[in-house]
Image (cartoon, helix red, strand yellow):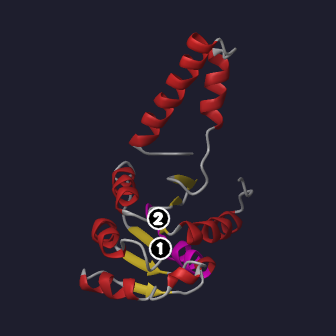
Amino acid sequence: LMVGDHQVINAATAVTICETLKYEYDFEITKEDIYEGLGKAFWPGRLELLSKEPKVLIDGAHNVDGAKALTKALSLFSRRRLIMCLGMLGDKEREKVVDLLVPLAHEVIVTKPNSPRAEGWEVIADMIREKGKPVTLIEEPSQAVKEGLARLEMEDMLCVTGSLYMIADAREALLELLGKPLRR
């Protein structure tokens, strides 16, 4: 399930393109084709709700625009506490992303993306501590998300976000932990 206001804009853009292809270029596209395409639209790791019980959202918000979209999407979910698992590369806008996302979290688990560009990944923990949030460092993303799930209580939500490298590993681990099939 994909969530977020921008997904509506993306869907409207896709429908407009289909209509243009049909009416301007004589492509054979039916309304049913469009409905089916929208129903099957899927982008792994992009504002993807992996589970409703417990609430688990995963998103590759690795820059400021992504963090803003994630902030908006998180406002759509009712929850008691938000546990965030965050891992970012060293060459990304870490501080700005932390400024946007961390105030929403009750606690944060910092993890290391599987990339040579993840140097200094632990620095994010210091940025989070400065904001007065409890923070835990767990290097391996699969262990970080396992710990995040273990900390969830009723009505809590786990949000896993940051580097697309980390998201891929975390998503695979979460699907296994949640007993769901891996869909690419």
The residue beneath circle 1 is: 85
Q: Residue at x 70, y 14 (%)?
A: 28
Question: Mark 1, residues whose alpha carbon is within 10 Å: few (<14), some, or many (≥20)?
Answer: many
The three-letter amino acid code for the residue at tag 1 is Cys
Q: Quadrant of the N terminus?
A: top right
- Of residues 94 and 148, which is closer to you in this image? 94
Q: Are marks 1 and 2 in contact (CB under 8 Å)?
A: yes
**Residue 143 point in image, percent of width and height:** 61, 81
The label shown at residue 183 is: none
With respect to residue 79, does 39 lie above or below?
above
With respect to residue 111, does 44 lie above or below?
above
Left or right, residue 30 beside residue 156? right
Magenta residues, as a range? 143-157
The residue beneath circle 2 is: 159
**Residue 167 point in image, percent of width and height:** 57, 67
- As measured in the structure, the alpha-carbon distance from the residue carrying label 1 to the one carrying label 2 is 6 Å
